[in-house]
Image (spheres, rainbow, N blue to C red):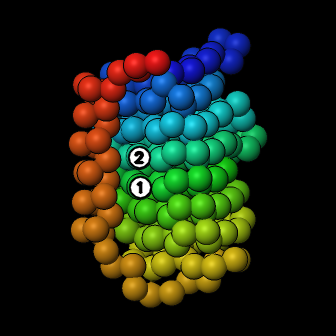
């Protein structure tokens, strides 16, 4: 994996986390226990820091960044889909951000909320618990209520991370 210090600031990656060798982690980044960061993901903590809780997945091609001095937080048991962009926002425990979605500055996605694929959550928007944010710009709809599904998806990625940590090997 490509892990870089930025000046005196080094990423803090829990020993039970899995970071794929083709992911990039830079600077003020903390990754919690049993979380996973997949190929092509970039976590660049140069302006305010990035915190990834325990048992969360940051999937392929996602970009996590921050803005001065606002950190980006991803809570525990979150699912951050493929090619997601998070910047200066908070994703609370047990939330799901679908493939290709963008969540921007000062936005908050509450516990058990869902951001649909390709949605754009603009600056300062709040996605309440149990709601879905869909579209560009995102509009709120009732009906997420699938906290069990989010937890199941998070647990699936914990298992995948364990498997990859134990079994992944380069052959060429």
Task: Report the residue marked by disc 1.
Answer: 79
x and y, in percent, of residue 155 in the image: 25, 51
x and y, in percent, of residue 139 in the image: 62, 83
Q: Earlier in the sequence, mark 2 or mark 1?
A: 2
Contact (Cβ within 8 Å) of mark 2 with mark 1:
yes
Helix, strand or loop at label 2? It is strand
Is residue 28 at all visible to an observer of this figure?
Answer: no
Q: Up-down: is 76 above or below 39?
A: below
Q: Residue at x 43, y 25 (%)?
A: 13
Q: Which of the labelled discs sits on residue 57, or is there none?
A: 2
Is residue 158 at all visible to an observer of this figure?
Answer: yes
Q: Residue at x 31, y 37 (%)?
A: 161
Distance between the alpha carbons at the discs numbered 2 and 1: 5 Å
Extreme bottom residue here? 142
Q: Residue at x 29, y 41 (%)?
A: 160
Q: Which residue is nearer to you in this view: 123 or 65?
A: 65
Q: Which residue is nearer to you in this view: 100 or 10?
A: 100
Helix, strand or loop at label 1? It is strand
């Amino acid at each position: 994996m490509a892990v870089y210090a930025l000046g005196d600031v080094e990423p803090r990656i829990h020993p039970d986390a899995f970071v794929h060798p083709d992911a990039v982690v830079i600077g003020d980044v903390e990754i919690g226990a049993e979380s996973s960061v997949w190929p092509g993901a970039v976590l660049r903590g140069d302006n305010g820091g990035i915190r990834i809780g325990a048992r969360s997945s940051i999937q392929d091609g996602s970009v996590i960044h921050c803005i001065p001095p606002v950190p980006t937080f991803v809570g525990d048991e979150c699912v951050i889909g493929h090619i997601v962009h998070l910047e200066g926002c908070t994703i609370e425990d047990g939330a799901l951000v679908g493939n290709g979605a963008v969540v921007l500055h000062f936005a908050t996605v509450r516990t058990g909320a869902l951001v649909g694929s390709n949605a754009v959550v603009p600056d300062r928007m709040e996605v309440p618990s149990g709601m879905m944010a869909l579209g560009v710009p995102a509009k709120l709809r009732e009906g997420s209520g699938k906290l069990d599904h989010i937890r199941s998806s998070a647990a699936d990625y914990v298992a995948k991370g364990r498997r990859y940590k134990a079994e992944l090997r380069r052959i060429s």
